Image (cartoon, grey):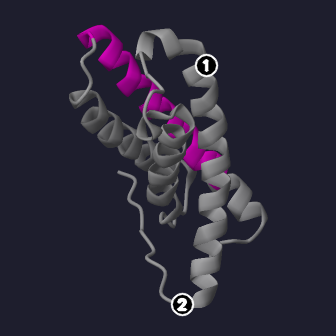
């Protein structure tokens, strides 16, 4: 059974590394979620009448929350990163769709998409961070 370690930034160097890992994850998530929005904007039904309904703000907040959760992981293997990433995506998306007034099938699709997306972004972040030596 894969296990993982979470690192909450103890010193300035670890904070810098965690921030860079988060930046990699944020960029990948923001691009992916923007493409997802553009493909499903009618189905999502996001209105842009109020400042807090702006799609870019929502995508940015979702990306920030997810990248923060993914960046604190200090994995040793790729299976750890995939499992942890999928779990983060699953939990966040289940909470999100609980407040949506959409069909069960659409909600299940959102959960599957977010779990898969985070399951792909997490090992990609691990790969880039490992190449750039961003783990102690």
40 in magenta: no
Residue at 28% over, 14% down: 102
From the viewer's perspective, is residue 92 above or below residue 81? above
- What's the residue at 38%, 46% (across, down)? 88
Q: Residues within 10 Å of mark 1 (few under 14, many from 20)?
A: few
Q: How many marks?
A: 2
Principal SS element in the magenta part? helix
* Quarter of the view holding residue 86: top left
Residue 1 place in picture, x, y as percent:
35, 51
Q: Does the CB distance between marks 2 and 1 fall below 8 Å? A: no
Judge whether 11 appears above or below 110 on screen: below
Query: Residue 16: percent from the left, percent from the top?
Result: 64, 78
Mark sitting earlier along the chain (2/1): 2
Q: Nearer the viewer, residue 26 or 130?
A: 26
Q: Which residue is mark 2?
A: 11
Disc nearest the viewer among 2 and 1: 1
Compared across the picture, whether 88 is left or right of 124 comes to: left
- Taking the spot 67% from the left edge, 47% from the top edge, the residue there is 27
Q: Determine which residue is flagged by label 1.
A: 38
In the structure shown, which secondary structural element does the residue marked by tag 2 occupy? Answer: loop
Of the 4 image quadrants, the one containing the C terminus is: bottom right
Magenta region, residue range: 103-125
Queried whether the magenta region covers residue 115, the answer comes back as: yes
| Residue 103 percent coordinates (x, y) | 26, 9
Is 42 placed left or right of 3 in the picture?
right
């Amino acid at each position: 059974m894969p296990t993982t370690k979470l690192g909450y930034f103890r010193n300035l160097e670890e904070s810098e590394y965690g921030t860079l890992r988060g930046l990699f994850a944020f960029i990948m998530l923001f691009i992916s979620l923007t493409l997802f929005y553009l493909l499903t904007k009618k189905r999502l039904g996001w209105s842009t009448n109020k400042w807090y309904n702006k799609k870019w703000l929502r995508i940015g907040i979702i990306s920030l929350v997810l990248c923060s959760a993914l960046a604190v992981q200090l994995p040793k293997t790729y299976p750890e990163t995939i499992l942890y990433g999928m779990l983060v995506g699953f939990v966040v998306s289940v909470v999100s769709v609980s407040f949506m007034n959409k069909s069960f099938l659409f909600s299940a699709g959102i959960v599957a998409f977010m779990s898969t997306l985070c399951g792909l972004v997490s090992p990609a972040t691990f790969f880039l961070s490992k190449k750039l030596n961003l783990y102690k």
